[in-house]
Amino acid sequence: MSLSIKLRIAGLTGLLLSPLAQADFSIPGFELVHTVPVDTALSTDDLRQPGPVWIELFDGAKSRIDIGQFYATDHPGSVMNKVLDHLEAAGKRGVKIRFLLEEKGIKLSDAATLERLRAIPNLTLRVLPYGQLSGGIIHAKYLLVDGKQAFVGSQNFDWRALEHIHETGLRITDETVAGQVQAIFEQDWQAQAALAGKHPVPLPASGQAPARTGNYLVASPQRYNPPGVGDSQLELPRLLGEAKKEVRVQLLDYAPLSYGPDRTRPYYAVIDNAVRAAAARGVSIKLMVSNWNTDPLELPYLKSLAVLPNVEIKIVTLPEAKQGFIPYARVIHSKTMEVDGQVAWVGTSNWLGGYLDNSRNLEVVMRSEAMAKRVGQLHEQLWDGPYAKALDVSADYAPPHPGTR
């Protein structure tokens, strides 16, 4: 099963409410943005949804909007349709829009949506074959406004990500982190131009290792990170290594495997080793994954982890929407971690090989008790709710429903 198929999913819920209709949760420079799929018993009324946040960002843009995404797809009458209306309005009033799309995401994108994007005034759409750089893809999902604000999260540029998938993201006004996200975009935008012109892609300048204090961005792959942006593949094991009491993790997928273009699955132990080491020294690990993670080749690794002392694993299965089956939806897709009530991690990467080593992904680390507490509560709501069931190491699990990958 290819990495691109594994990644065809989306995100959040809901009704398109006014920002004033909900209280937002934020710390200086960061607002947690979250929705659960419609037609579930879950609720996060204190958090804003991504649709209204994206619209607010686009409406406030004065000079430029930059968007980096895996793929793009809309649906008539959806929240995403309204988002595109406001993106189009920004282009019509003279805002310059740059849209960077992964080449492998073209076949996952809706042709009509791509046609609509290309027709927006002042919008330039570029397609980057990220595999030519590193063997991976652009899996990051982010946007920027005027170089001063950013949004990073698990939400793909997909109507389902705003209504039918459990997602978590961040609106970022922190000047340093927004600047780091902008530097990532500029690096990849220039890489696309170099590849299109059949020129060598310059590597970013080297710099001192960034500080690991406060709130900061890490990204992958490390060799294409601008100066000042840390390495996700290095930072995640470090944070797990620093854990003393408890780690709560929510993901679409977890396995010590890599998904390559030839459909092979070489062993990738970087994250798994760190998780097992934390459990071995007494840290409580509460790992929650989607029912898509019951792939016959992935499930044995989950079971081998679940039998360890201090490790609990739950599988989350969301109910079908009232409107019926929706392919590539009705799943948890958030990528979050909370460590000891002190550190929060919100990002775009699943915990598999091919993500933190070869693909473009962004992760925000916040050393904030307030943010860690709220991210932990998001985890707890699902963990204790009706859709999460403890992994039974002696049970056989049916593979995911056809059309969900």
Image (cartoon, rainbow, N blue to C red):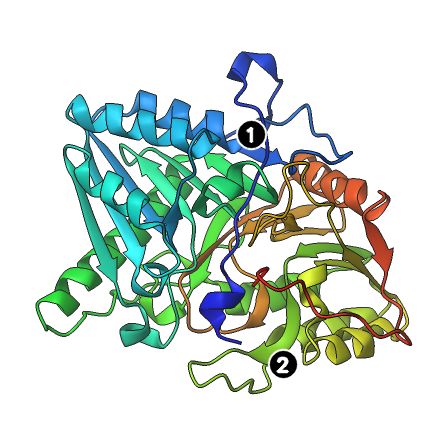
Separation of marks 2 and 1 at Cα, in angstroms: 35 Å
Which of the two residues, 108 or 233, is positioned nearer the viewer here? 108
Mark sitting on residue 269: 2
Mark sitting on residue 72: none
Name the quadrant containing residue 128. bottom left
Residue under the image location 24 percent in, 70 percent down: 203
Which of the two residues, 376 or 213, is positioned nearer the viewer here? 376
Which of the two residues, 156 or 231, is positioned nearer the viewer here? 156
Name the quadrant containing residue 375. top right
Farthest residue, direction front: 324
Res 180 visible: no
Q: Which residue type does callout 2 highlight?
A: Ala
Q: Which residue is mark 1?
A: 49
Q: Which residue type does callout 1 highlight?
A: Gln
- Label pair 2/1, CB-CB below 8 angstroms: no
Rendered-image quadrant of the C terminus: bottom right
Residue under the image location 30 percent in, 44 percent down: 112
